[in-house]
Amino acid sequence: MLTYQALIGKLDAQVDGLLPRQVLDRSRPDYGGFLSEGIAGGTNIGTVSLLGYAYLLEGCRYYRSGEILERILAGAKFGRHIRRPSGRFDLITTNFDSAPDTGFQVQTISPVVKAARRAAADGDAGAGEIAKALGEIVRTAVPGMTTGGFHTPNHRWVLVSALSQARTLFPDVDVMGTIDAYLAETVDINADGEYTERSTGVYNAVCNRSLRIAAAELGRPELLAPVRKNLELSYHLLHADGAVVTSISRRQDRGQDVVPVGLADSYYTLARMDRNGFYAAVADWLFGLQPGGLPWTLHAFLEHPEWREDDLAREPLPDSYSKVYATSGLWRVRRGKMSATAASGITAPFSLRHGQADLCAVKLCASYFAISQFCGEDLRAEDGKVRLTHPGRGRHHNGPVYYQPVGEPVDQQRWQETRMQRDVYVLPPLEIGLTVAEVKDGFDLQIATSKGLDGIPFQIACDFGPGGELDFDSGVVPGVAGQTAFLKSGYAVYHVGNDAVSIGPGAHAHRMWHMRGSEGASDAFRVLITRVTPVDRVLEIRYGAWSPVTGGIQESR
């Protein structure tokens, strides 16, 4: 469970690992900084917050430690040395003199300043030094945060929360004009609870945390409404092992295997605020799978000491459901240890995970003018099925084209400009339809082409997470990343441990190992089923327990 007592032990261990990274040689210019990849960058001033939690929280081995106090003050001194004249910090991997990255740091150290002020009022002189040293960094950063702007959608809410925290600590700072300007844009969440970046592994947590902090500091509880919507959606995007669907992300977490423990602090905080046993159970589950998320998983207990004794009853977590999120173009199905996703807007329109057996993508493609890698434009649900369609349009025209001569000189500089002025000979687009239906212990994927031309090579690529074995009628092959097998006929079963997924029937109309216009799968084991257009067939996908006796999936009872 995510409890104060469990977190304090994790805090001790994390501080133990952090201390050797701090530079304590006063003759060095990076004195007080924390080395990461051989360098102490400006944004690791936020690392000091972890030491602040350790100093301030009772039960921690470093509670009111003189050594930790000196290290915090050294870290603050480094922060004053490394910051830009604007008061902003660099994210040395990419962003310099960066307001949003400064916002992340202010967001992290402000709770320490607030708690240190409370401790100082109770007579802890060391806490007073912490509040003064870190508070100066917060206050000095305010002008730079108000004028420095942002890059990505989540940065707006990071800046709003950081500025609202600064305003609480220093009521005289002039920040409300900037805060109101950002909030006037309205929170970028859709009806399903999905933020613009769709970043299930990273930035959903950032948005939720930032909005709930701003809600508290500004006294605007309406900012919690999008947080609740996203937390509801996020649970239904979790697999049975706690990993989250990342194939839909528009950020760097896309395709990664992530247990989103970064969501735990918002689940837990809202659980306590709303007396919501479901949220609390999700927080417990995520933390149990990946204990950590510090210091944010301790934030609720730093802000609310009364929560350190947990009397909130938990609710059972549902593990069987079918949810359509029409606005987001998502269908999520969970049946115990199996979960499946159908999605529009991405080139992996279907995926399924059953325990350790991961069919991470079913991809459809034709070698038709490099515009036929399937990406469903929308998702429509009807009669327990969902349907997606790839329209087969080109980048500039409604279908594949050949260009006509213009009858005048065309030099290199005018090539692109002239291209769009040319008459064109148009071929019909190749439309691809995909209908997904849940059946007993699996799914049927109806795949059909229309329009286009006959005789076009077509493939169904089933990409599996590596590490298993593929059994079929006359052979067995290991599931090695970057390798490809053809399923010529019949059915094949991919199994990892006792978990298995079967696909079929196979077909072998061509032997294109890397069909032009199709996406590769260097990090997956690919099984290809090949046809030529017109295509109208069902791909049967089933899941269950692997039986080495029968060489197939054991029938469920």
Image: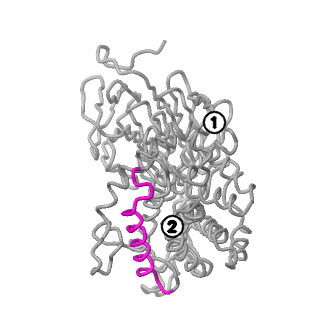
Name the amino acid type tagged 2.
Ala
Q: Is residue 203 covered in magenta?
A: no
Contact, mark 2 vs mark 1 (Cβ under 8 Å): no
The residue nearer to you, when weighing 231 against 247, is 231
Q: Is residue 82 left or right of residue 466?
A: right
In terms of secondary structure, what is the magenta stretch mainly?
Answer: helix
Q: Which residue is mark 2?
A: 125
> Quadrant location of residue 291?
top left
Other-residue count near label 1 (Cα within 10 Å), few / some / many at <14 / 14–19 / ≥20: some
Q: Is residue 201 left or right of residue 17?
A: right
Q: Is residue 514 left or right of residue 142?
A: left
Q: Earlier in the sequence, mark 2 or mark 1?
A: 2
Is residue 313 placed above or below 168 in the rendered structure? above
The number of numbered badges drawn on the structure is: 2
Gap between marks 2 and 1 measured at Cα: 54 Å
Q: Is residue 62 covered in magenta?
A: yes
Residue 392 drawn at (x, y percent)? 54, 53
Badge 1 marks a residue whose secondary structure is strand
Q: Which residue is found at the position 24% from the left and 26% from the top?
A: 475
Badge 2 marks a residue whose secondary structure is helix
Residue 243 drawn at (x, y percent)? 46, 41
Q: Which residue is mark 1?
A: 323
Residue 273 drawn at (x, y percent)? 68, 45
The residue nearer to you, when weighing 180 against 347, is 180
Q: Which residue is found at the position 36% from the left and 63% from the top?
A: 67
User: How did the renderer colour the structure?
Assistant: one colour
Magenta residues span: 61-85
Residue found farthest to the front? 123
Residue 18 drawn at (x, y percent)? 34, 59
Disc 2 vs disc 1: which is toward the camera? 2
Q: Which residue is found at the position 38% from the left and 67% from the top?
A: 71
Name the amino acid type tagged 1.
Lys
